[in-house]
Image (tube, grey):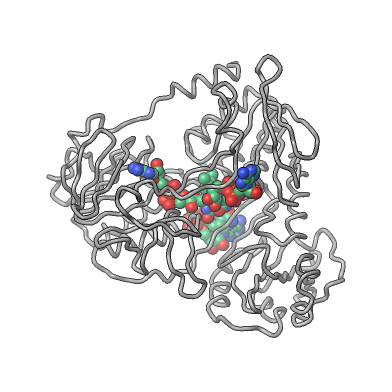
Amino acid sequence: NLTTEETTNAKKIRKLVQIPSLSESIPDNIQYLLIGGGTASFSAFRAIKSADPTARVLVISAEGYLPHMRPPLSKELWYGDDTEMAKSLNFHQWNGTSRSLFYEPEPFYTPVEELTTAKNGGISLARGWKVESINVSKKKVKLNDGKEISYDKCLIATGSVPKTLKLYDDANEELKNKFSVFRSISDFEDLWEQLDHIKSIAIIGGGFLGSELAASLANKGKKNGVKIYQIFKEKGNMGKVLPKYLSQWTTEKVRNEGVEVVTETEVENCSLENNKRQVNLKLSNGKNISVDHVIMAVGAKPNTELATDAGLEIDSKLDGYLVNSELQARTDLYIAGDCACFYDKQLGRRRVEHHDHAVISGRLAGENMAGAAKPYQHQPMFWSDIGPSVGYEAIGIVDSSLVTMGVFAKGNHKDPSLLANETDQNTLTNKKETNEELGSKNNETISENDYNKGVVFYLKNDVIVGIVLWNLFNRMSIARQVLKTDRCYKDLNEVAKLFNIHGD
Ligand code: FAD
Ligand code: NAD
Ligand code: NAD
């Protein structure tokens, strides 16, 4: 078995795969240039090829892997019993079928050297290469070794990058080695390997990543005897998204998975201890914990490092490249996915860091690059799974500081009249008037089981702006329809009935 130090060294010497190895093989000019090898870029090249079958598309990706999806990295990959399957980045989907993380196998891509001469065009991938700058007026990009490529149409789909903690930024290298972020395949592989050698790990952050990963690691950790801590400042898991009662209920589920969840707490300081084998975390609740490793799951920021040189505008509030409805930042320059700040004509300017938005905005950008000129009008959804018993989908603005009203199936009864509703406690204290308008039974006590399945509405000026479907699947089209009507509903229980909560 490797020690933690040896694992860290192995991680450092893992070399970035760079294919092709020399940039001379990469074309000097190209019809369609896609910057980024993530989901938005994948979706764009698929759309370009179907609109323009002989298109020549060059994808430049800073990652050493073929384009792939990220969601299973913090969920499905940790659950299967088959270690070899996980190592080969295959996983079982929710419906039992197996699937690869990679969107397309290697032979799908035309070798970069052949792209300009291939009779029917093709899609080529230069991986391990980074675009350093864009000259928007000359329609040229520069790679990290200085090579220039000119384009007819270009897409920036550079995604987002994990944020780090200030105490990490200020730490020395030795201490930094005990910390990691989690976003890529190599982060998954490193963590997978580490879990065989360590006895304790702390995840800092209570959002999507921290909550999904804590539950997943606890599942794997049970077999290896690894203790998992999750530390964050909110009152419960997903506290910024879920109403308080639901967030607290979810926290209990995460605890039941074996995670020691430390809420309303921040990490104030850290230092090496036990012969530098462990990190001591000094917490704002006065306690100290010692762990072998720390994962920072403290949010992501859009990757807009190409903006300054290119003179592209960044949204001052939401961050991300500002785009018009056709997802253009400039003529012949498109933006999609996490790094795009787009206008949602119903809900205002937004930036969305989720899979479905990457798929649909990437597809639209691709279609527009091939000449379609269509506006982005899709209302993106997202989903999350936190351990085996919490799965939800959501659409619109789901922010726990809004007024919320939830309707849940009572117990396990199939009788649709047995619904229990719940208004967020914050809402109860702050927004009594809204409660009365909703006519909800605020004081009804709902037993633990009652949050197993339901729907939560998020309201602004009494209009539904967001919906969470709690352990309730295949109803997203209804949610999308409800959101679209932009109406002030008198009785949300009636709206909840549309979702047929007891239906399956
Ligand atoms: P990314 O996937 O980040 O891809 C960006 C690409 O650009 C990368 O390949 C990067 O290396 C490359 N790049 C960046 N700069 C350059 C450059 N200068 N030159 C060349 N290449 C560059 N969403 C959900 O809805 N549901 C989920 O369950 C879910 N689970 C997730 C789990 C994890 C662990 C993570 C990290 C995210 C999850 N998400 C989920 C969010 C979702 O994966 C992202 O919203 C999505 O990946 C965004 O796609 P993108 O193409 O915009 O960016
Ligand atoms: P997040 O924004 O969901 O959660 C961030 C968490 O870190 C919060 O608990 C916040 O309070 C905490 N935090 C922020 N700054 C902090 C600081 N300085 N000190 C301590 N705590 C701090 O982001 P995430 O969970 O890190 O996710 C990363 C990215 O991956 C996001 O883009 C997210 O959308 C994406 N992701 C999405 C899914 C999904 O859609 N199901 C799953 C995993 C990851
Ligand atoms: P997909 O076509 O595999 O699934 C999308 C549909 O499946 C949605 O309508 C969703 O409501 C339904 N669904 C998801 N989880 C379900 C569950 N546990 N029980 C019943 N129905 C469920 O999605 P895709 O576009 O191929 O997305 C890519 C990845 O996203 C896949 O790995 C897929 O498993 C995953 N995904 C997961 C969830 C989830 O776990 N909640 C939801 C949607 C997609």
Task: Classify residue 423 by image quadrant.
Answer: bottom right
Say if residue 248 shows up in the picture. Answer: yes
- Residue 160 x %, y %: 46, 48
Residue under the image location 75 percent in, 59 percent down? 244
Q: Residue 344's spot in the image, x, y percent?
A: 46, 70
Examine the rendering and report whether any part of residue 93 can be seen.
no
Q: Is residue 504 above or below residue 255?
A: below
* Residue at the outermost bottom position: 490
Quadrant of res 249: bottom right
Q: Is residue 141 above or below residue 426?
A: above
Between 268 and 178, the one lying in front of the other is 268
Q: Quadrant of the C terminus?
A: bottom right
Query: Looking at the image, in which quadrant does ligand 3 appear?
Result: bottom right
Whole-percent x, y for residue 2 in the image? 58, 16
User: What residue appears at the point 78 percent right and 73 percent down from the top-left corner?
Assistant: 419
472 vs 67, nearest the viewer: 67
Quarter of the figure with the N terminus = top right
Looking at the picture, how far across and down is residue 61, in whole percent?
34, 41
Looking at the image, which residue is at 50% across and 59% down? 317
| Lateral position of residue 404 relative to residue 379, left or right | right
